Image (cartoon, coloured by chain):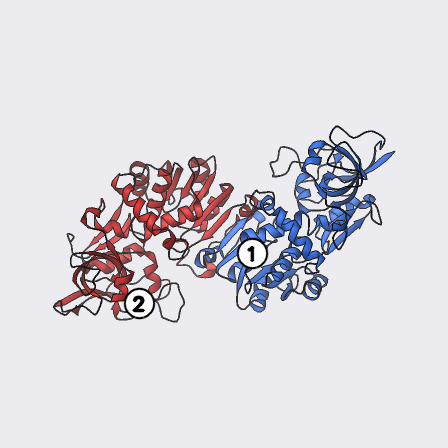
Chain colours: A red, B blue
Amino acid sequence: MTNKTLIFKKIPPPLLLPIAGEHLVIEDRPFDLSNPPPPGGATVQVLYGSYDPYLRSKMRTPDVASFTPPFALDGPVTADAVARILQSASPAHRPGDLLLAHLPLAEYAVVSSETLATGTIVPGPRRVPPGGLGVFLGPLGMPGLTAWAGLYAIGKPKAGKVMFVSSAAGAVGQVAGQIAKREGLRVIGSVGNGEKLAFILDELKFDGGFNYNKERPGEALPRLAPEGIDIYFDNVGGEHLDAALENMNLHGRIVSCGMVSQYKLEQEERYAVKNMFLLLQNRLTMRGFLVYDEEFGPAHTDEHQEKLYDWLVDGSILAKLDITEGIENAAEGLINLLKGKNFGKAVLEIKRGGS
Amino acid sequence: MTNKTLIFKKIPPPLLLPIAGEHLVIEDRPFDLSNPPPPGGATVQVLYGSYDPYLRSKMRTPDVASFTPPFALDGPVTADAVARILQSASPAHRPGDLLLAHLPLAEYAVVSSETLATGTIVPGPRRVPPGGLGVFLGPLGMPGLTAWAGLYAIGKPKAGKVMFVSSAAGAVGQVAGQIAKREGLRVIGSVGNGEKLAFILDELKFDGGFNYNKERPGEALPRLAPEGIDIYFDNVGGEHLDAALENMNLHGRIVSCGMVSQYKLEQEERYAVKNMFLLLQNRLTMRGFLVYDEEFGPAHTDEHQEKLYDWLVDGSILAKLDITEGIENAAEGLINLLKGKNFGKAVLEIKRGGS
């Protein structure tokens, strides 16, 4: 039998998007389900894969340093994924169990004992969250943990304060904003189009928002937060950061989570921030982090899994997913995310129509 | 009798320096030493006054907000000072005791019970530090506490790490750098002339340094700290900050203590920082603070007074003071500081030749 797999075929030029069919290709790779799994490992059916911006940084030559290793050329594109165990050689995993792990984007995968040890077994079927298994890759996955850890460890939300979150309909922003709302903050969001603006205002019930393609942050923020901003959850950087700095209150805190406006630029093209003087004048704290840093993700995983699950169940957190259906569309779905065309957490459903 | 006093006579134009004889004037104000002190207060002879950059921000109209109240027009310029108690109506203060408090820059002063309560009585004559009473306004005063609190609360120094401190011969920088040296860090400093460079290298024994009027920080830092910077103690801002960002190691920490290169500029003239992207990429922490903020100065006062006194006595911390002699030169001394012409902590010795 064969196994449809998203293959990293060719390294795209630095800063440019990969092209489907050239850099990212679907191939039928041989696979034999009747083979036993490796010692202590398992054979799995991959159900959902997570599309995240960092995957672009893995499409590089191995000599460039990064926090994440590069993809092997002609090997599978790997991502955080939800899979069902078909065969297990591990006493801790039974066929039918669900696994959360970093896996190939493919119909099937052989999972080593090492990967199995790092993966989380999703607790029983009763724990499938509202929104389905894809939610384990969004609010209950890495983006949700990023929002949780950044907000609590750096933002330190307190009821009555004002938070501004950029890219507020995105995978991280929508969770950060909703948690802050639930903690009693006033939340203002920025998004890139009118549909997303309606979403954060009407569905997520944020207190204010603007479309940054229609209004500049420096004009919108004084209008939407005349009392100033106490926490800025930054997913965008650049002009957004500058405008936030200008509107921060004394002792405000900036969670530097992403700078999507800046990643694809050469160093000399990057936005120069005019208001750093205000960081001193208003005694602000600004901190960059990565979810894998010990005091961020790892330190907050249990609390995040426990509480956010309950909040999804009680409806106080909504999950907006952008699902690409079918492994045959895997390259296009990933490229759409890298173009910023997704609306909500981008997820690949390997088998059209679900598990 | 009369009391020579530095008077705030006229508000200087925004961002410009005051002029001696116009904005700052020495006047003989009436004073009667035979009058009893107010209830619970004292009459004092002022010995040393502290020249600090923030004093410029008190020379303004009262309608402009700031962390510090403005000077009253035609009233005395006040500053942190060391004084000797002449007459006391407070049971806790005896004639001859030394007082550290915010006082007029004048020969004599009447001290209210409120001011007396906020002031520190310098413990007995045995505790006069090497360098003399002026040291209570430098390493053992507000600038020293600023260095201490910023370094420990934000920088979190660890032996073997590398610290870069700008304005390294200044009142705060010389203390921050020396403490870091004592904690086992490699310390690199920037200064504005060759004499100061010789001072930090030969006397303070810093591991490296450069004259920023001869070499740009962006060129000097890779040369002096090829292994990268773990802590940047920033007194300067602007181009220094940008160059430091470019040379910071993963998880580096920036103590934003001052931005002397930026204070006197209008907002639109301020330096735009090009490397903020690297704050995220290298997961840096950057924090602005003021020594009066609760978790900074107040939280560190006891430890600072205790340990730094011992380090001055054992010679591991040197105090470099820049002393202006005589109350009649008080205006010129202050203006020199605001021009950056001082070398070491700027102090006014009220009575030429000392106490």
The residues tagged by marks 2 and 1 sit, at their Cα atoms, a distance apart of 35 Å
Q: Nearer the viewer, residue B80 or B62?
A: B80
Quadrant where the image shows the N terminus of chain B: top right
Name the kind of residue labelled 2 in the image: Phe
> Circle 2 is placed at which residue position?
A71
Q: Residue furthest top?
A: B39
Q: Residue A268, percent across and down?
A: 48, 60
Name the kind of residue labelled 1 in the image: Leu
> Circle 1 is placed at which residue position?
B241
Question: Is residue B62 at least partly visible in the picture?
Answer: yes
Please state the chain letter of the residue tagged with numbered disc 1 in the rendered image.
B
Please state the chain letter of the residue tagged with numbered disc 2 in the rendered image.
A
Q: Residue A62, percent across and down?
A: 36, 71
Secondary structure at numbered mark 1: helix
Q: On the picture, is A323 further left or further right than B220? A: left
Secondary structure at numbered mark 2: loop
Q: On the picture, is A193 further left or further right than A124? A: right
